[in-house]
Image (tube, grey):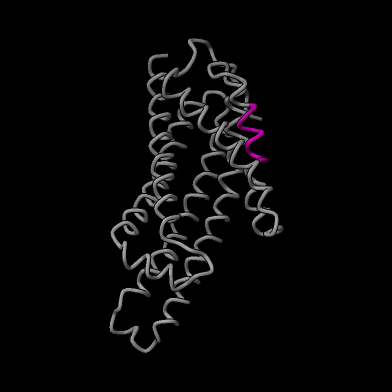
Amino acid sequence: MNSMKKTARIAGSLYFIYIVATIFANTSRTKLFEFGNAIATANNILASEGLFRIGFMSDVLAGVLFLLTAWALYVLLKPVNENIALLFVLLNMGGVAVQCLNMLNLFSAMLLLSGANYLKVFQADQLQALAMLFIDLHKNGFMIAQLFYGAWLFPLGYLVFKSGYLPKILGIILMIECFGWLMYPFQFFLFPAYEVISYLSFAVGFIGEFSLTFWLLIKGVKEQKPDVLRAS
């Protein structure tokens, strides 16, 4: 039980640091990117290159932290059902892989604005437009990663619900969040004019993942024997 409490707190700590890194990266991008305005965005990046680089590395670090969080949760929940625990790790891994590869699009935008000699064949406005294109590609790649990040929540929530050593309500919230968060990329790609649909995703995601994070970080696990499932 002491080992499980330690694992729970490690998972909670990793999850919390991941959330902080993600918030910082998204905040830094918000300050620099003006979608639809290539000139302003290019000027912002050039004026705050240090902030751009720090935000970039924060995003990459967040991906690593999220994968480590999934590993810690796997260790914590595999006594309930190892196969389902492996499933949520694989879904998480898929999202992290897409997210980290997609970061190349973001860095390409800065390379286009770097003033390198081989880029002098392009006009300044062409480079700015290409940089904006890569930033848009990054946004689309980010949404693809959200499909994996939404899907992993259902098996995670199910195991939390069945564990017996974590509150069942957390498991229910996480399973609901799965469907709420999947609305985010589906709205982006299928109904781009209806951004209001995504607000539900943000609300449910805030409640679900913050609740799990702080419970693991502060409470850990109950001193109770898990309701172990037999893998079929």
Q: Say which quarter of the image contains residue 150.
A: top right
Q: Nearer the viewer, residue 181 or 165?
A: 181
Point out the residue furthest to the bottom here. 121
Secondary structure mostly seen in the magenta stretch:
helix
Left or right, 59 with respect to 139, comes to left
Q: State the residue at coordinates (47%, 53%).
A: 97
Q: State the residue at coordinates (38%, 30%).
A: 13
Q: Quadrant of the N terminus?
A: top left
Question: Eyeballing the image, is 3 above or below 177?
Answer: above
Residue 41 location (% of width, % of height): 43, 67
Q: State the residue at coordinates (49%, 47%).
A: 93
Look at the image and say whether residue 178 sits in the magenta stretch.
yes
> Over which residues does the magenta segment extend?
172-180
Residue 126 location (% of width, % of height): 45, 82
Q: Nearer the viewer, residue 23 or 227?
A: 23
Left or right, 138 with respect to 189, comes to left
Q: Nearer the viewer, residue 142 or 1?
A: 142
Look at the image and say whether residue 213 sits in the magenta stretch.
no
Q: Quadrant of the C terminus?
A: top right
Q: Nearer the viewer, residue 155 or 133?
A: 133
Q: State the residue at coordinates (50%, 56%).
A: 98
Point out the residue furthest to the front here. 40
Residue 50 location (% of width, % of height): 28, 59
Q: Say which quarter of the image contains residue 12.
A: top left
